[in-house]
Amino acid sequence: MSEKEVLFTAEGLKRLEDELEYLKSTKRREVAERIKGAIEFGDISENSEYDDAKNEQAFVEGRILTLDKQLRNARVIDIKDLDTSIIGIGSNVTLHDFETGEDLEYAIVGSAEASAMMMKMSNESPVGRALLGKRVGDIVEVIVPVGFLQYKVKAIR
């Protein structure tokens, strides 16, 4: 079975590579030291420090596997080649939210790079999917789990 292509901006790919390097070079060593220290306490059958460190080790190793897989299947979107007359992955958009009356700015990115805190919307989210291919002036209507959203595309960069 072929693996799904993972889309990134150059910035998003660099952030992922940096995280992977940190996990492999620094975090693994820190967790190994925690495990070693916990073992020195003696009986590991009832040692919460050991259990916590082993759980963290499992999390770190799982994250490393996930990042390795994403990087193997990564494709970088070259923002220099973007058509700013139409919304695509890598576009920065300004939307007018009819419900709140606010203008919102989002970057449309691949799902692995999405972050609500950083205003980076996944191309696979309901709103992200609805925005793809739209132009300035278009009205976008989206049914989402919490109801109905309506936006007007004000700018594409």
Image (tube, rainbow, N blue to C red):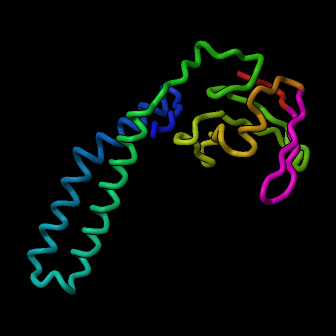
Q: Answer whether residue 146 is magenta in the image.
A: yes
| Place of residue 142 in the rendered image (x, y in percent of width and height, measured from the top left) | 83, 45
Q: Residue at x 9, y 82 (%)?
A: 42
Q: Residue at x 74, y 45 (%)?
A: 126
Side of 32 relative to 11 (left or right): left
Judge whether 152 appears above or below 38 on screen.
above
| Place of residue 15 in the rendered image (x, y in percent of width and height, measured from the top left) | 43, 36
Camera-nearest residue between 73 and 27: 73
Side of 8 relative to 149 (left or right): left
Side of 143 relative to 68 (left or right): right
- Can residue 62 be seen here? The reply is yes
Q: Which residues are magenta?
A: 138-152
| Place of residue 146 in the rendered image (x, y in percent of width and height, measured from the top left) | 80, 60
Side of 61 relative to 126 (left or right): left
Judge whether 74 appears above or below 30 on screen.
above
Q: Residue at x 29, y 48 (%)?
A: 23
State the image quarter where residue 89 is shown.
top right
Camera-nearest residue between 35 and 8: 8
Judge whether 81 appears above or below 55 on screen.
above
Q: Answer whether residue 66 is magenta in the image.
A: no
State the image quarter where residue 84 is shown.
top right
| Place of residue 58 in the rendered image (x, y in percent of width and height, measured from the top left) | 30, 62
By secondary structure, the bulk of the magenta-drawn segment is best described as strand
Please tell me how many numbered marks the rendered image carries: 0
Quadrant showing the N terminus: top left
Judge whether 9 appears above or below 57 on screen.
above
Quadrant showing the C terminus: top right
Q: Residue at x 18, y 53 (%)?
A: 29
